[in-house]
Image (cartoon, rainbow, N blue to C red):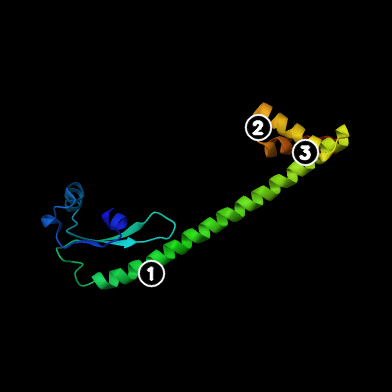
Amino acid sequence: MDAAETRSAQYSPDLADETRWPAYTEYALATGVRCVLALPLPLADEPDAALNLYGLGPGALDDGREAARGFAERAAHAVGEALRIERHGASAADVRTALLSRSVIDQAVGILMARDRVDARVALDRLRRVSQHRNVRLRDLCGDLVARVADGSRSGRG
C-alpha cells in the first residue's frame, strides 16, 4: 500500500529486520517470505497500484531490482491501456443502450400519437407522467407498450 500511495518503491531485503509494517511482516514471515520489493504502478485517472515481488531468502531480490523497475513501468502502461479500453467499451455500451432506449421510446410515442390522435409532445408527456406515477423507467414502460402492441398485432387483435 505504501508503494501505491507514495508512488515510491518500498524494499525490504530481510523482513526479519523490518519495522515499518509490523502486521504485514508477521504474516509474510509466517508464509516463508523474507524479502519484498513493492514498485508503484502510477495510473492516469485511476487510483494508483503497486506490483509486489517476494523472495524466500534475505536479499533474494537485490540483483533484480532494476529489471523489476523496468517491468513495473511496462506493466503500468499495459494496465492503464487495459483500463482505457474497458472505459471505452463501457461508454460504447452506454451509447448503444441509449440508442435502443431512444428507439423504443420513439415507437411508444408513435403508438400513442396514432391511438390517441395527439402530437409527439403530448404523447411523450403522458408517457413520462405514467413512468413517474408507476415509478418505472421510461424505457421499460415504453418497451412494455411496444411489446403489447406487437403481441396484439401478431394474434390478429388490434
Q: Earlier in the sequence, mark 1 or mark 2?
A: 1
- CA–CA distance in space, label 1 to label 2: 47 Å
Within 10 angstroms of label 3, few (less than 14), some, or many (20 or more) residues? many
Q: Residue at x 34, y 69 (%)?
A: 71
Secondary structure at numbered mark 1 = helix
User: From this viewpoint, is residue 24 visible?
Assistant: yes
What's the mark number on residue 15?
none
Of all residues shown, which one is farthest toward the left? 17
Label 3 belongs to which residue? Answer: 146
Q: Earlier in the sequence, mark 2 or mark 3?
A: 2
Image coordinates for residue 113, horizontal then vertical, percent: 85, 37
Q: What amino acid is found at the position of numbered circle 2 in the picture?
A: Val
Label 1 belongs to which residue? Answer: 74
Residue 99 in the image: above or below residue 70: above
CB contact under 8 Å: marks 2 and 3: no
User: From this viewpoint, is residue 157 visible?
Assistant: no
Figure quadrant of residue 128:
top right
**Mark 2 or 3, which is nearer the eye?**
2
Image quadrant for the C terminus?
top right
- In the image: residue 114, left or right of residue 144: right
Q: Residue at x 74, y 42 (%)?
A: 105
Figure quadrant of residue 68:
bottom left
